[in-house]
Amino acid sequence: MPIKLLPISLANQIAAGEVIERPSSVVKELVENSLDAGADAIVIDIEQGGRRRIRIRDNGSGIAQHELSLALSRHATSKISSLADLEAILSMGFRGEALASISSVARLTLTSKTAAQSEAWEAWVEGRDMTAHIQPASHPNGTTVDVQDLFFNTPARRKFLRTDKTEFAHIDEVVKRLALARFDVRFSLNHNHKLVRQYPAVSTSGYADRVARVCGSGFVEEAAYVDESAASWRLWGWISPPQACRHQADVQYFYVNGRMLKDRLLGHAIRQAYGDQLHDERSPTFVLYLELPASEVDVNVHPAKHEVRFQQARQIHDFIMQALRPLLQRPPPPLATTSATSSAASTAQPDWQRAQHQYRPAAADIAAQLQALQPLNRSPLPAVMEPTVVPKSVPTVEPASSSTTPPASVPLGSNTSMPWRVLTVVQQRFALLQRLLEQGQSAPLLLLDLQRVQQRALAAQYAEQFTTGLAGQPLLIPVQLSNSEAIAQAKQIPPALLARLGVMLEWQRQQCIVKQVPSALRQTNINQTLPELLARLCDRAADQEQLPQSLWLWLAQLQVATQYSATQAEHWLQQWLQWQQPPQYTVALTLPTLAEPLK
């Protein structure tokens, strides 16, 4: 087949396949054009999920009569005119493909009026016939784009559309994203002649109100506000703490210079800022805005403009992570006191189930009294936690209604072969355990420190893996080591020892680039934790076969959880019971026996 130029209509349909995926793509492209035209009020009318009709009305600057036909041509735009403009784009659109692509797969009517004209004009285009028909019309200042019968001439594309409800849900999501991008614009969304969404324009003081309308008031009430700057960069917005994050990833909005993006680099920075604090399959929840000079970001990457490239990608990544981490690493709020529940339990229940029902309301009282126990306070674990000799007696927690006399010490039973059950988790860290005994016998209770159990288990796992070498994890973005002392220490440590620990360094003249680290360091600030690892190794460089227990405990501390669920408590209880001489990371409790009714 000879080489020849494609017909304009066919070229436009090919371009439409990249830009116009579904009705929501049409809404996005047309509303972005309205924003670029300076509109501060936009009305979006949808019929039958967008397949029947999409009409966008705005009060922007409009299009002059002699430019209407040109506006419907491919690669016709007013946004850029030179290569210098392409390298510093601030407008939402710039390629000049949207109107031509839409008109090639739908019946499109473009009506517009500028302030300088005395009357409005209308251009009409249908499918493969790319000739625009111009005629006078009645219209206020601004532009209306009316798109009807989307994909009427491409049946293969039309049959892939989902139900009207699904397609409108995609349009609704696009309007939400645009409403969060421009707080100063009023948006109205109608479906089948009914008002569905309305976002009034707000000033700076009302930004939180707009976010609450889009994401829900609960998000704004629980989220932390961030506003950090570095040089010409600024990151601001809202991000939920780990315990308030949603289980679904439906509130994840990130904007770069007002452009909504879903970028892997940005997502990785946010995830790394959370560290290991996200549990129960929760997803990061945020509405964030990054502002930087237009010359430092390339938006000409993806046909639909969903991706960008940063000139200083690693620095942007670190800036975002360091701006968010202090807000997300704060300890969770104290456990709220729960009201007493009914103590009536079915007599048909086994003793341990009845005990679980009766003791659970006392968990808040126990949590309140934990503050007085030095071994199990809520302060962070020490940097190095060596195993300690447990005293023969430990503090006893009395019921909350007892006097304020200091609790007496009682011996802790050492027999851990008896069955234990988790009744509840106190302060999201301590498991309240009960030993199952016969009817009428005293039922000992223990509080087990899950964090210390997990730390010891991980330390033992690291020490065992070291014999064959720890598996390192490559960094998505290599980190340049900035600590000069750490660089000097890295030169003294044999590469074989670093490799066995999962550390991979690359030397570029006098620069040290970190390419890979062990899993314990993966979600930490590498420029802080790696120098500490190197310092611990420096004195042990000659002995590559035996590393101190303190090193493994330190690595484990970086990876232990901060909150534990009941399921996790069961897992670590079994781990604790498997040890031949389990360390007593516990406190004994004296409560009434099962034979005595609880008051």
Image (tube, rainbow, N blue to C red):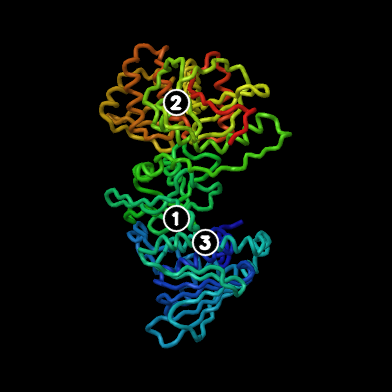
Residue 303's mark? none
For the residues marked 1 and 3, what is the alpha-carbon distance in whole angstroms?
Answer: 20 Å
Mark 3 nearby-residue class (10 Å; few <14, some 14–19, many ≥20) = some
Compared across the picture, whether 485 is left or right of 96 comes to: left
For the residues marked 2 and 3, what is the alpha-carbon distance in whole angstroms?
Answer: 61 Å
Q: Which residue is mark 3?
A: 174
Q: Secondary structure at mark 1?
A: helix
Tell me where residue 74 appears, x and y as whole percent: 49, 67
**Quadrant location of residue 86?**
bottom left
Q: Mark 1 or mark 3: which is in front? A: 1
Q: Which residue is mark 2?
A: 407
Which is nearer the eye, 476 or 387? Answer: 387
Q: Which residue is mark 1?
A: 220
Q: Quadrant of the N terminus?
A: bottom right
Q: Secondary structure at mark 2?
A: loop
Compared across the picture, whether 235 is left or right of 369 comes to: left
Q: Mark 2 or mark 1: which is in front? A: 2
Can residue 85 be seen in the rendering of this structure? yes
Which is nearer the eye, 414 or 287? Answer: 414
Can residue 129 be seen in the rendering of this structure? no
